[in-house]
Image (cartoon, rainbow, N blue to C red):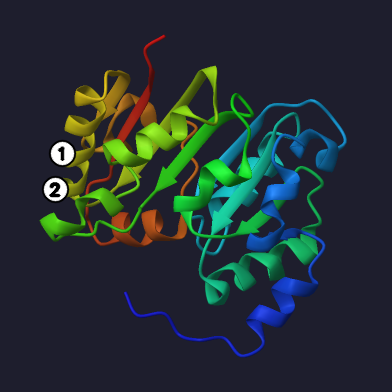
């Protein structure tokens, strides 16, 4: 997907009180509870786009701290515009590539991860770049608490099938799975992303998997 450059987005992000920049993440590692000023669980969304999902989650669950991770400034700035309006105290953002996730969080610091409509990287030679690959699952293991889990949603069936196999091969436990979320028992309470609404309106079934490490 080609992203349109948003003039001034980098400057807006750099000046925002709600963003931790890539060059600042090492200072925050192991200290995220200090930033939020409490010991609430920390949930992150990797590749959070324009922020609809994570902002809705933060509003619904004030007892949880949320961090949105996004590497594209032109996308992140749209979430910042919304946060500047709503000023949710339990939400902040990191501008960085997901490959650096271990640099941002200490072992056991993260209590849940959301992966929503991630880039499918369709070519086989790019499989390790997929956020549900065994390489990324190993990274998540190094930041997650013992009871933490992942929710993964996509309309891309080949990516979903790949992700299911990756989870199994890495020894993760699949708690529940559906290939048509909106027509399943798991639809109740589902919080949608921008892409999810668009794709479901087009008639695309949404796949969802909830899984966790076997301890």
Residue at the outermost bottom position: 7
Image side of residue 8 versus residue 189, left or right? right
Asked if residue 148 is positioned above or below residue 30 in the image, the reply reads above
- Residue 158 at x, y percent in the picture: 13, 48
Residue at 49% across / 29% down in the picture? 142
- Identify the secondary structure beneath mark 1: helix
The one nearer the camera, 30 or 61, is 30
- Residue 76 at x, y percent in the picture: 59, 67
The one nearer the camera, 27 or 81, is 27
Image side of residue 52 versus residue 30, left or right? left
Residue at 25% across / 49% down in the picture? 128
Image side of residue 47 versus residue 121, left or right? right
Q: Tag on residue 158?
A: 2
- Residue 113 at x, y percent in the picture: 50, 36
Q: Residues within 10 Å of mark 1 (few under 14, many from 20)?
A: few
Q: Quadrant of residue 111?
A: top right
Q: Residues within 10 Å of mark 2 (few under 14, many from 20)?
A: few
The answer to the question of whether label 1 and label 2 lie on touching residues, with beta carbons closer than 8 A, is: yes
Q: Which residue is mark 1?
A: 161
- Identify the secondary structure beneath mark 2: helix
Residue at the outermost right position: 37
Q: Tag on residue 48?
A: none
Residue at 72% across / 81% down in the picture? 11
Quadrant showing the N terminus? bottom left
- Residue 106 at x, y percent in the picture: 63, 32
Residue at the outermost top position: 215
Residue at 36% across / 62% down in the picture? 198
Quadrant showing the C terminus? top left
Asked if residue 127 is positioned above or below residue 29 in the image, the reply reads below
Question: Alpha carbon of mark 1 to alpha carbon of mark 2: how far?
Answer: 5 Å
């Amino acid at each position: 997907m080609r992203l349109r450059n948003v003039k001034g987005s980098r400057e807006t992000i750099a000046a925002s009180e709600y963003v931790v920049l890539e060059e600042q993440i090492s200072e925050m590692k192991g200290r995220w509870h200090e930033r939020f000023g409490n010991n609430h669980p920390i949930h992150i969304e990797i590749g959070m786009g324009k922020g609809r999902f994570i902002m809705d989650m933060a509003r619904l669950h004030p007892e949880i701290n949320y961090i949105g991770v996004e590497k594209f400034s032109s996308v992140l700035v749209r979430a910042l515009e919304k946060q500047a309006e709503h000023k949710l105290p339990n939400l902040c953002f990191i501008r960085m590539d997901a490959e650096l996730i271990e640099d941002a969080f200490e072992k056991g610091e993260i209590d849940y991860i959301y992966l929503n409509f991630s880039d499918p990287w369709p070519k086989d030679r790019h499989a390790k770049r997929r956020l549900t690959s065994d390489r990324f699952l190993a990274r998540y293991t190094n930041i997650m608490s013992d009871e933490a889990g992942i929710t993964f949603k996509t309309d891309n069936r080949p990516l979903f099938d790949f992700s299911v196999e990756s989870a199994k091969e890495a020894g993760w436990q699949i708690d529940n799975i559906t290939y048509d979320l909106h027509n399943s028992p798991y639809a109740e309470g589902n919080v949608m992303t921008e892409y999810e609404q668009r794709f479901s309106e087009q008639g695309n079934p949404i796949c969802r998997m909830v899984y966790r490490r076997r301890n």
